[in-house]
Amino acid sequence: MASASPPVLDRWFPSRKPLPEPRLRLFCLPFAGGSAAIYQPWSMALPTGVELCAVQLPGRERRLMEPAMKSLPALMDVLMPALTPLMDRPFALFGYSMGARIGLEVARTLKRQGGPKPLGFIAAAAPPPSHNDREPIHTLDDPGFIAKLREYDGTPEEVLQHKELLELILPTLRADFALAWSENGKDTAPLDIPLSVYAGKGDKHVGLDTMEHWREESTADVRIRHFEGGHFFIRTHGPPVLAAVREDLTRWMTAAQG
């Protein structure tokens, strides 16, 4: 398997604390504008033996001066070589909103390339790309884009009011939303791994009926969970989300052991 140098791994996984013999590695991908830090509270709360690998994408925190990726194929070209050295152990994927779209592409890429198979994939707060009928807000002018960001309620108001800071992060936010809207179509072949889909009951941007279409994305077991809260239920209802993650990972690890 391809190897990556420690500096490369540190850049992509800045908060990773390697375990000597991990039972499973959980790769976590953030929502638009988010960073690896959103998953840090999980590090000590996952099942025993699970190593948290929260992905830090370009254009945020210590990678702020790197241009954010707005093309999914271009992102795969640099992300996959960072992920594959850590896929020498059983692993699973978790993606939230934009991160779910990236996670799906990681799983599809592994399948196309005959790579290692994830034990499972958790997709949260995002429609499958074949049923993405949301407005492509990254194509709006700055005032329109900022107004739509307010509707998503994911960017703090003090940031939206801070002109200099906003100028710094707006290109990353636009790039992230472009990634989230990538490829409005279904892959030619569905995945063959278990999917667990997390949906917010009050999510104004992704309806519960739309989330049902994730069942078309895999020939394996697909389970859909509903959570209280809106689009960012991971923030407002974090403990139930983490409990569900623990349950899913435990089930998949148990199944893998036969």
Image (cartoon, rainbow, N blue to C red):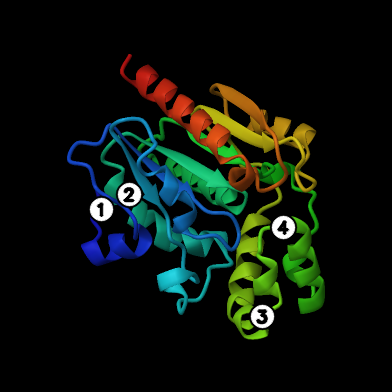
Q: Earlier in the sequence, mark 1 or mark 4?
A: 1
Q: Which residue is mark 1?
A: 2
Location of residue 79 in the rendering, given as x and y in whole percent from the top left corner:
41, 58
Q: Earlier in the sequence, mark 1 or mark 3?
A: 1
Q: Residue at x 59, y 63 (%)?
A: 33
Mark 1 or 3: in front is: 3
Nearest to the eye among marks 1 and 4: give it: 4
Give the mark nearest the N terminus, 2 or 4: 2
Residue 178 in picture, x, y percent from top left: 65, 63
Q: Which residue is mark 2?
A: 84
The kind of residue tagged 2 is Thr
Marks 1/2 in contact by CB < 8 Å: the verdict is yes
Q: Is residue 132 left or right of residue 108?
A: right
According to the picture, the residue beneath numbered tag 4 turns out to be 153
Q: Is residue 74 left or right of residue 185?
A: left
Which residue is at the front of the view, 1 or 29? 29
Q: Report which quarter residue 13 is drawn in.
A: bottom left
Instruction: Identify residue for label 3.
Output: 162
How crowded pointer 1 is (Cα within 10 Å; few <14, some 14-19, many 20+) is rated as few
Nearer to us of marks 2 and 4 is 4
Disc 3 residue type (three-letter): His
Apparent side of residue 1 relative to residue 193 in the rendered image (left or right):
left
Residue drawn 76% across and 71% down? 146
Nearer-N-terminus badge (3/4): 4
Q: Residues within 10 Å of mark 4 (few under 14, many from 20)?
A: few
From the top left corner, tell me how far across and down residue 164 is, in percent: 62, 85
Task: Please tell me which residue lies in front, 61 or 41.
Answer: 41
Separation of marks 2 and 4 at Cα, in angstroms = 34 Å
The amino acid type found where label 4 is placed reads: Asp
Depth order, front residue of 186/215: 215
